[in-house]
Amino acid sequence: MAIADSECVFCKIVAGEIPCAKVFESDTVLAFLDIAPVHPGHALVLPKDHYPTLMDIPPELGNDLFKALSAVGGAVMKATGADGLNLMQNNFEAAGQLVDHAHFHLIPRFGDDGLRLWAQSSYDTPDDMQKLAGTIAGLLK
């Protein structure tokens, strides 16, 4: 039984209720071109079932998603002549997620495209970094 959200635009695309520029489909994964691309060829790869965020996707879908991301990413680069490729995945509104259906962006990049990644910073002290690492590791046990 498929998991769907009747209000989700990506679920409607998966169901064929809304058209898309499909580039890949398997039993569990769909990929199509983004309607608001960073560059032409910008594709979205998503599980067909509705999972709101990365943390909701069952681990057993990982292999299907990774195979699709690799195949579609390579095809996007070849089709566009891109020099590189960004793989991005946003979770929750604060991180830029616009559709509450987990999805991955494959964005073709060019050496002279002028796009910049976000600014980086540092920890106040190495001890602060180690303390946070310990907290995160402890939550994974």
Image (cartoon, helix red, strand yellow):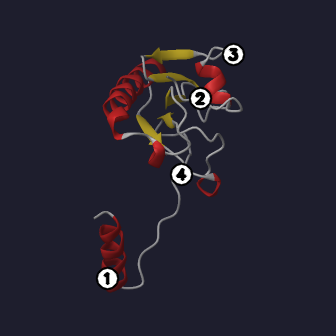
Disc 4 to disc 2, how far (Cα)?
35 Å
10 Å neighbourhood of mark 3: few (<14), some, or many (≥20)? few
Mark 2: give few (<14), some (14-19) or many (20+) Cα within 10 Å. Answer: some
Q: Nearer the viewer, mark 1 or mark 2?
A: 2
User: Along the line of sight, which residue is nearer the eye, 43 or 114?
Assistant: 43
Residues under labels 3 and 2: Cα distance? Answer: 13 Å
Of pointers 3 and 1, the one earlier in the residue sequence: 3
Q: Position of residue 135 (x, y in %)?
A: 35, 74
Disc number at residue 16? Answer: none
Q: Residue furthest front?
A: 1
Per the image, the residue denoted by label 2 is 4
How far, Cα to Cα, is label 1 from label 4? 27 Å
Q: Earlier in the sequence, mark 1 or mark 2?
A: 2
Q: Which residue is mark 4?
A: 116
Q: Earlier in the sequence, mark 3 or mark 4?
A: 3
Measure the C-alpha gap from mark 1 to mark 2.
Answer: 45 Å
Amino acid type at circle 2 is: Ala
Say left or right for 114 vs 55.
right
Alpha carbon separation for disc pair 3 and 4? 36 Å
Res. 17 mark: 3
Q: Which residue is mark 1?
A: 126
Mark 2 lies on a secondary structure that is loop
In the displayed structure, does residue 95 sit left or right of residue 54? right
Q: Judging from the image, what secondary structure is the residue with disc 4 in?
A: loop
* Quarter of the rendering containing residue 71: top left
Quarter that holds the C terminus: bottom left
Q: What residue is drawn where x is 42% and y is 17%? A: 27
Residue type indicated by callout 1: Pro
Q: Residues within 10 Å of mark 1 (few under 14, many from 20)?
A: few
